[in-house]
Amino acid sequence: DGYVVSELLKHSQIDSIDHIELDEEVINVSKEHLPWGDAWKDEKVNLIIGDGAAYVKQQADKGESYHVIVQDASDPFWLDEDGGITTLPSSVLYDTSHFESLYKLLRPKEGVLMFQAETYNIPSNLKSIRKWRGLLRDIGFGKPRYGSISISTYPTGQIGFFAAHARDDDVGGERVCEAGDTCDGGDGVVVEEMEILPELDWNRILAQFHGLSGKTRYYHPRIHRSAYDLPLWVEQYVNGDGVDI
């Protein structure tokens, strides 16, 4: 609906944005009714009406590359009342071949992928979150991390996202804690991965926040970190150590 585009435009260092939307009517309704409806008028924005999965594969096969890819997709499946699962059209944006194309489309060692990753409060969603994390790691993404967002319009009031980098886990030669490690000297407390990631440069994060060309209503520097502080049972399950549900 253009909201992601409008937020990206607040970052002056961004030179261009390719926005791929399957349904042109979504754009038309957003332009008429939503406060960020003028986002597509910015000369940096290139609106493409078409199939997102097909576009990603096409661009990857052509050897194109992006610094950042944000996939704000709708739910890939629906849980029926009888416990069965109905696969939805957007499931193609969550399958292995699509994630492989996304990885190929990112700039090597630099690119970042972010995508909508459901709520951990619904068991079927939580299983998918763990599956997606494993899939991203198998493809080659470095340290895929699940973050949490509070949003009242989504079931349970919580939804999440994955952030994953097109680079190795071993960043700058520093050791990164894995689930179950005790990286603080052995007293049994697991150090959060965000604590020791060398790219977590607070001066840079603060500078970027204060340099935004518009105000934010949700994001601020402290939530940049706290979004990844999950309930222990969620962290253990997503990282593969929790009891299956």
Image (cartoon, rainbow, N blue to C red):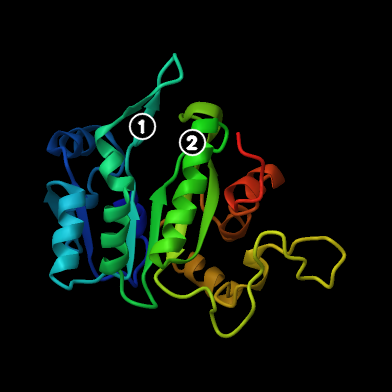
Residue 77 - label = 1
Report if residue 69 is visible in the image: yes
Tell me the residue at 32%/65% (across/down): 103
- Kindly identify which residue carries mark 2: 125
Q: Is residue 43 above or below residue 161?
A: below
**175 left or right, relative to 134:** right
Which residue lies at the image location 54% right of the left edge and 69% below the top edge?
Answer: 205
Q: Amino acid at mark 2?
A: Asn
Callout 2 environment at 10 Å: few (<14), some (14 to 19), or many (20+)? some
Q: Residue at point 38% right, 61% down?
A: 113
- Residue 77: image quadrant is top left
Q: Which quarter of the image is occupied by the C terminus?
A: top right
x and y percent of residue 46 in the render?
Answer: 15, 58
Residue 69 at x, y percent in the picture: 32, 60
Residue 138 - label: none
- Residue 237 placement: quadrant: top right
Q: Quadrant of the N terminus?
A: top left
Mark 1: amino acid: Phe
Q: Nearer the viewer, residue 167 or 245?
A: 245
Give the image location of residue 219, x and y in percent.
51, 53
Tell me if residue 215 can be seen. no
Count neighbours of disc 1 (C-alpha within 10 A) and say few if under 14, some if 14 to 19, many if 20 or more.
Answer: some
Residue found 48% across the figure and 54% down from its top = 133
Residue reaching furthest to the top: 82
Above or below, 103 relative to 152: below
Badge 1 or badge 2: first in the primary sequence: 1
Front residue of this view, candidates 194 and 167:
167
Element type where label 1 sits in the image? strand
In this image, 177 relative to 67: left or right? right
Quadrant housing residue 91 = top left
